[in-house]
Image: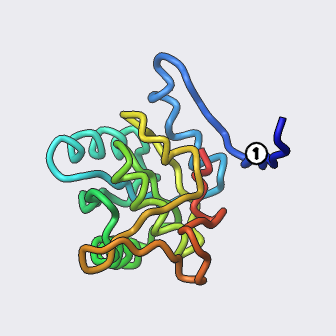
Amino acid sequence: MKPFVYEALPIRVVFGSGTISQVKFEPERLGVRRVLVLSTPGRGEAQAREIATLLGDLSVGTHDGAIMHTSVEATQKALQVVKELGADAVLAVGGGSTTGLGKAIALRTDLPQIVLPTTYAGSEMTPILGETKDGEDDATDTEGAAGGRHLRRRPYA
């Protein structure tokens, strides 16, 4: 057997039928009070509004700007919304596009992120972020780490 190293990431998974009704407990557990719910345009918007409703007064609104391959431009727009609404956490609902946007925001702001995956992308379980800039892959993060990896991108719940 060849030697290898496995590094487990600290992560919390809440799984099971009906657990969506408990989504409000995750921001409360993290001690945040102003959650911005992220989604893709279209069908994702309805899901985001549903989650915002479940969050009640913890939600500061929704942003439907997540797109495939998490462009730096889309991230900049989302960061402006985070700032305008005074969000202290983000909750990504959807697939890999929304999860990626949450990671990009977390990297640049140190805000906690919660991910509510509706499809399996794998992104919800890793600290890896693939971004694009001007339509090209940008595999370095804002701290210059090769491969687009950073633990700040790890979802909290």
The structure residue drawn at horizontal position 53% and vertical position 82%, both measured from the top left corner, is: 142
Number of numbered tags placed on the structure image:
1
Percent across and percent down for residue 115 are 48, 46
Q: Is residue 85 left or right of residue 127?
A: left
- Pick the residue in front: 14 or 74: 74
| Left or right relative to 90: residue 72 | left
Identified at 39% across, 68% down, the residue is 131
Query: What's the residue type where badge 1 is placed?
Result: Ala
Secondary structure beneath dot 1 equals loop
Residue found farthest to the front: 1
Nearer to us in this view, 75 or 79: 75
Pick whichever, 25 or 142, lies toward us. 142
In the image, residue 154 lies at what x, y percent? 60, 55
Q: What residue is pinned by disc 1? A: 8
Quadrant of the snapshot with the C terminus:
top right
Quadrant of the image occupied by residue 132: bottom left
Quadrant of the image for the N terminus?
Answer: top right
Residue 54: name its quadrant.
top left
Residue 34 placement, left or right of 45: right
Rendered view: 64 above or below 142: above
Q: Residue furthest left?
A: 42
- Viewer-side residue, 157 vs 60: 157
| Other-residue count near label 1 (Cα within 10 Å), few / some / many at <14 / 14–19 / ≥20 | few
Please give left or right for residue 37 compared with residue 111 in the image. left
Q: How is the image coloured?
A: rainbow
- The residue positioned 30% from the left and 51% from the top of the image is 39
Q: Residue at x 54, y 58 (%)?
A: 128
Q: Position of residue 36 (x, y in %)?
A: 40, 59
User: Residue 8: x, y in percent?
Assistant: 76, 45
Residue placed furthest toward the top: 17
